Amino acid sequence: MYNESNIHETHRRGRIEVICGSMFSGKTEELLRRLRRAQFARQTVEIFKPAIDTRYSNEEVVSHDKNSILSTPVEHSGNILLLSSDVEVVGIDEAQFFDKGLTDVCQQLADQGIRVIVAGLDMDFKRVPFGPMPDLCAIADDVTKVHAICVRCGALANYSHRIVAGEKQVMLGEMQEYQPLCRICYNQELRS
């Protein structure tokens, strides 16, 4: 688990921190918390998000609780390298929407001594590992898995159940399109 006593270590060495979980689990909230702490510590911070994520804002990372921080939308993971000069901390939200090159980008940044904090869905609505997230979890120095609360029974929820029609893997959505479910409730939904 992420340990804030490592904060001094990040000045000397790069690292990759991954925050993953289902929708509505607080991934972006945790990302914002860590980035704000880095800013408070007077570290130079740059935040990126995929350009396709325009749900709440074109230029801000916004949590479902409406907390936000200014970010740079990018089309391709390679752009992050170009825009990350002279920073100490890089934040990346909605990492599952990036291309597979994001893993190499994060590795390069960390190798340059930059603290990289990545947040994203670990699985899609079919419980399939999503985009570069499995690879990022594998190379991370630290992985934090956060959980939502199942809207059916109140247990910890691991899964993002899509409640609207559509088979496309990428479909931006909120509570009208998705709901967090635990394993038991997710399986019951599949059988119904």
Image (spheres, rainbow, N blue to C red):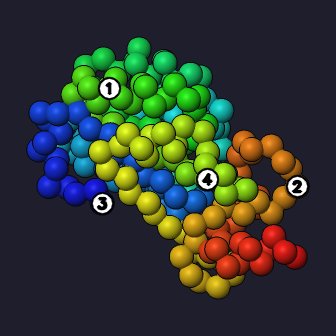
* Badge nearest the viewer, 2 or 3: 3
Residues 157 and 184: in front is: 184
Q: What separation in Å lies between label 1 and label 2 (alpha carbons)?
A: 39 Å
Residue name at image x 45 percent, y 63 percent = 146
Q: Earlier in the sequence, mark 1 or mark 4?
A: 1
Label 4 SS: loop
> Above or below — where is 25 with respect to 46?
below
Q: Earlier in the sequence, mark 2 or mark 4?
A: 4
Q: Mark 2: which secondary structure?
A: loop
Residue identifier under label 1? 109
Q: Examine the rendering and report whether any part of residue 113 can be seen.
A: yes
Q: Which residue is mark 3?
A: 1
> Which residue is tagged 4?
123
* CA distance separating discs 3 and 1: 21 Å
Q: Are marks 1 and 2 in contact (CB under 8 Å)?
A: no
Whole-percent x and y of residue 85? 30, 17
**Number of the label disc, if any, that sits on residue 165:** 2
Query: Residue sitting at 17 percent across and 43 percent down?
Result: 41
Residue at the spot 61% in from the left edge and 49% down from the top edge: 129
Alpha carbon distance from label 1 to label 4: 25 Å
Q: Earlier in the sequence, mark 3 or mark 1?
A: 3
